[in-house]
Image (spheres, helix red, strand yellow):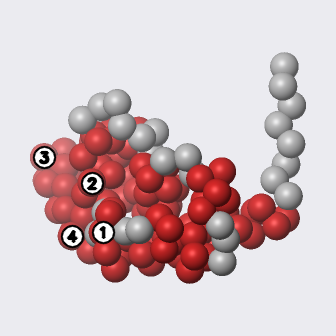
Amino acid sequence: MAQVRPMRADARRNRERLLAVAAQAFAEHGEGASLDDIARRAGVGVGTLYRHFPTRQALLEAAYLERLEAIAARADVIAAARPPGAALMAWLDELAVGMLQVRGLKALLGTAVTGGGPACGDCVRGAAT
């Protein structure tokens, strides 16, 4: 069994900077934001970006994971306060608002919800069922 080494402090800082810059870039330019520009703005080389996030989809997913988990968690809160049909409609309204407020979230959810997409879609699919 392979042992997973903890991430070095500098690598962790690079990853955190990349995520912060990526979230800002995706908010400004949508999911098509330049990965080279994201790396440059984070103060790292593009190789470092790809070492942490091998695809654009992986970066997009990591940048929005907390947001998606928060939207998914709202499903339980809403379901506890409303009848099933009304709860589903209220939650879908919140999901739609989230997709309008956060550029790139729609593209991420499109592949996540239809299947075969990123694992972060699991929380949204689970909340919808």
> Which residue bears the numbered disc 4?
100
Q: Look at 27% across and 54% down and name the residue there.
A: 107
User: Where does label 2 land, which residue?
Assistant: 107
Q: Nearer the viewer, residue 5 or 68?
A: 5
Dot 4 or dot 3, earlier in sequence: 3
Q: Is residue 94 left or right of residue 43?
A: left
* Residue pointed to by mark 1: 30
Residue 123, relative to residue 48: is it above or below? above
Q: Quadrant of residue 93?
A: bottom left
The answer to whether residue 76 shows anywhere in this view is no
Viewed as shown, does residue 115 lie left or right of 93? right
Q: Secondary structure at mark 2?
A: helix
**Which comes before the other along the chain, label 4 or label 2?**
4
Q: Amino acid at mark 3?
A: Gly
Amino acid type at circle 4 is: Leu
Identify the residue under disc 3.
85
| Disc 4 from disc 2: Cα separation | 11 Å
Q: Amino acid at mark 2?
A: Ala
Residue 124 versus residue 84: which sits nearer the camera? Answer: 124
| Separation (CA) of disc 1 from disc 3 | 32 Å
Amino acid carrying label 1: it is Gly
SS type, badge 4: helix
Q: Residue at x 25, y 64 (%)?
A: 99
Quadrant assignment for the C terminus? top left
